[in-house]
Image (cartoon, grey):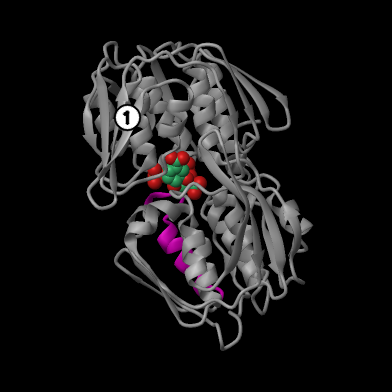
Amino acid sequence: MSSTASSTAAPMPLVARGARPLAGRVRVPGDKSISHRALILGALSVGRTTVTGLLEGEDVLATGKAMSLLGATVARTGPGAWTVDGVGVGGFAAPPETLDFGNAGTGSRLVMGAVAGCPVTAMFDGDASLRRRPMRRILDPLVKMGATVLQAAEGDRLPIMLAGARDPLPIVYATPVPSAQVKSAVLLAGLSAPGETVVIESEATRDHTEKMLLHFGATVTVVPEGAHGRRITLKGQPELHGATVVVPADPSSAAFPLVAALLVPGSDIVLETVMTNPLRTGLITTLREMGAAIEEVDAREDGGEAMADLRVRFSELSGVEVPPERAPAMIDEYPVLAVAAAFARGTTVMRGLKELRVKESDRLAATADLLRVNGVTVTLDGDDMIVEGFGGKGRPPGGGTVATHMDHRIAMSALVMGLATETPVAVDDAAFIATSFPGFVETMRGLGADIG
Ligand SMILES: O=C(O)C1=C[C@@H](OP(=O)(O)O)[C@@H](O)[C@H](O)C1
Ligand SMILES: C=C(OP(=O)(O)O)C(=O)O
């Protein structure tokens, strides 16, 4: 259960071939964002938190391990069922070893926030991909709140040794990039600060931290800010109480079978209990604009989060222009949207994708290469990506081997593409899929896909 299993294991090449129609019902694994937050807030609460449907992917397991190293008691009681006995706000103990987050940006950044509000020192590290990712965006506000960076690699990157604040200060912080991870790190540090910690974002990002803080007993208010933004105010030093968290299926994982069903002729599938929080459904909005048949069945709510079963049928898609303000609601879905665009009639323009450059890989470059190596014309113009679709003229040729660059979403997007291209698509390494979607290949095979 090492968090860095993917980075140390031998590469795992895979090939996806033209499939017969996809059919059946599946529930993809639990939401990654909610799973990380359930473990962290459980660890910062008094009493027991019970989680069901937790994503047992490597990213989340690394956060679980970090919570036990910081003093919480984290136990698995069954498949996806976990308990966390917390230490209370500000109660983390100095960890006896490095906190290794493997491939996970969310885990490392949110836990830096939580540690920044406690009087302990911790060493944070990750795999080669995570060591390349920017951490200054997190450290800047945390230092303002009283934390100290004792050690960091060049460019403020991991490995980083962070000393939490003895007397954390509340701040008013306008996030310089649209990032739920930055927002969440500030709010988690703000739990230990007296008074009000305020985060202002000019574009609303996923709000799971705010919702879950309320669920665990904190006082949080959210008001609109400008045309697309929000102002979030947290009252510091609450007593958080252990809670029950039911994790819905991850819309970012559902995106892969969903796009596969749209592209493989004759497909008709149902994705069960997918979270439909509007700050996560930019892909569904976009695909519907492109002509996708995606039907929400049995829409419901649990623990403040909306969810529904999604019936998805093969659809002839048309190119669209995706506005930049939609990016935060579908930030992890652009690689698979670009694959869908390659099958659509006409051109798809995706604007404002700067943040894709600092994910597990440079996803703008990796997505463009994924398509080009399979015969699709792609233009990168600054932060915009333009894809010329094959719709009305046949299908993209395929036949390429995609370099996945330690990036699970590039690997899954390429395999989805291969289910509908003229010739198979290969990936150099599918091992990183286990960070967010354990059982991806089996799930897709269960729907009829030919991946092996
Ligand atoms: O807060 C979260 O759970 C996440 C926020 C996003 O990152 P950014 O905050 O860097 O945009 C997203 O890409 C990541 O997969 C999960
Ligand atoms: C960007 C992602 O995750 P993280 O930032 O947690 O590594 C992702 O899952 O696509």
**Residue found at x 48% / y 15%:** 95
Q: How many marks?
A: 1
Image vertical order of residue 56 relative to residue 444, above or below: above
Q: Mark 1 points at which residue?
A: 186
Residue sitting at 39 percent across and 20 percent down? 115
Q: Quadrant of residue 143?
A: top left
In the displayed structure, would residue 137 be above or below residue 296?
above
Which of the 4 image quarters holds residue 416? Answer: bottom right
Query: On the picture, is 296 further left or further right than 179?
Result: right
Q: Is residue 209 above or below residue 69?
A: below
Q: Is residue 275 magenta?
A: no
Residue 385 as seen in the image, left or right of residue 251: left
For the N terminus, give its image quadrant.
top right
Residue 367 is a magenta residue: yes
Q: Is the magenta stretch mostly helix, strand or loop?
A: helix
Seen in the picture, residue 389 relative to 36 is either above or below; the reply is below
Farthest residue to the bottom: give it: 393
Asked whether the viewer can see residue 268, the reply is yes
User: The magenta stretch spans which residues?
Assistant: 358-374
Which residue is at a point 49% across and 25% down the rendered structure image?
40
Q: Quadrant of the C terminus?
A: bottom right
Location of residue 126 in the rendering, given as x and y in whole percent from the top left corner: 48, 35
Is residue 370 visible in the rendered structure shown here?
Answer: no
Q: Label 1 is placed on what type of residue?
A: Val
Q: Quadrant of ligand 1?
A: top left
- Label 1 residue SS: helix
Q: Where does residue 439 sit, x and y in percent of width and height? A: 71, 47
Image coordinates of residue 214 in percent, x first then y, are 43, 27
- Please provide percent x and percent y for residue 230: 29, 42
| Residue drawn 50% across the image and 73% down it | 290
